[in-house]
Amino acid sequence: MRSRKTRESPLTVAFIYDRKVEHIAHGESQHEYADLSDDVTIGGITEALERLGHRVVHVSGIKALVKDLAAHKHKHWDVVFNYSKGSHGTARGTQVPALLEEYQIPFTFSDAETLTICGDKAKTKVFKCLATMLFKLTRNYRWFWIITKSQRANMLWCPNTDDPFDYSEVHKKLSYPLFVKPTSSSQCNGITAANKIVQEQDLQHEVEKLRSQFKDQEILIENFLGGREFTVAISGTGEFADVIGISELVWDTHLLRGRDKIHIDFTTELSRRERCVNKGFTLENVPSSDPLWGEVVELGLKAYTALGCRDGGRVDIRLTSEEQGSAPCVIEVDPIFGMRPDRSRYALIAKSNEVAYHDLIQEFLDSAIQRHEAMERGTVGI
């Protein structure tokens, strides 16, 4: 990690976040706002910033930000620590960065453009396929389909059709097992054991259930990747991006899915909530001696930089199968990732690699400030 230049100069840091309990207290769905910040995460980031000597200004969501901008309070801020996930719309995570960009306020993490792409899993896959280096590296030419809000199917990489969706076409193009998920949900929201489709007759029921539950999102149908799953924690921007470490999700072989009697080998809402007691899976640090280390690191960094991620991010990668020589594939890129100090994957990876939580926070600030200074100088780079 790079030297930290800002530690000797305390900053006024506007910390923007969306507090989960405030939305739930107003009667809004806990399911809908599952990816908003809990008090442990907010407290952890605040404590780290204050430990580093910075003055923290709390800004609770986009409406509070708009009021502060109108009152010109932002003129007293040195930098924004942006941890806003937004509340409404499929591109809700882009709203705060877009405002900050317009006001030319330096902020941590990715810009609105990158968040738009990464916030929609279907768009991320399209981008990956158009980015030649990623397309070749993953060696993954799988078909995937998107069920649109208008109940029509668009097969990506092929002409759109106005015909009603025919599920039999999926059976022709994809091989079972399949995996279905909403395109714009994070934190495993909408993911249960039923999302893995083993039998052809279950596909339509599960897709329609997700469509009714996530009315503003498209549903992605793809081949299930049955191999090892890794999480790559990355810090920095552009040529300065570096991998902090890698963890592997090791699944509980005794946890079975319903009537199918098959092992649950992917993260669900339940396993995410209860991972602190190791229900469903455990996280294990992956040493550099692992035969797949180099390939996973390379793919993670290339996905991160190609999508324009900045300051920090998390890349989730799975192998196509458990067979030797199977290909690693990017399943998600998260530019604003879980940062709960006691159990988020990113924080645990950093801890396993002897990087303190407050040092992560400072690294993100340094990267953002140095990038902003470079832009003001008109220099090319980060």
Image: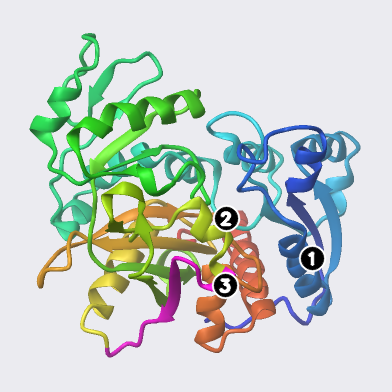
Badge 3 is on which residue? 277
In terms of depth relative to the viewer, which is nearer, 4 or 190?
Answer: 190
223 shown above or below 15: above
Q: Distance between the residues labelled 1 and 3?
A: 22 Å
Quarter where residue 197 is shown: top left
Task: List x then y, in percent, for residue 39.
Answer: 77, 59
Residue 33 marker: none
Badge 2 is on which residue? 375
Residue 162 seen in the current view: yes
In terms of depth relative to the viewer, which is nearer, 308 or 188?
Answer: 188
The secondary element bearing badge 3 is classed as helix
The secondary element bearing badge 2 is classed as helix
Q: Residue at x 46, y 56 (%)?
A: 309
Badge 1 is on which residue? 43
30 shown above or below 55: above
In terms of depth relative to the viewer, which is nearer, 102 or 130?
Answer: 130
Report whether 43 appears left or right of 278.
Answer: right
**What span is in magenta?**
276-289
**Mark closer to the chain start, 1 or 3:** 1
In terms of depth relative to the viewer, which is nearer, 211 or 263?
Answer: 263
Disc number lying in front (3 or 2): 3
Q: Distance between the residues labelled 1 and 2?
A: 31 Å
Colouring style: rainbow
Q: Residues within 10 Å of mark 3 (few under 14, many from 20)?
A: few
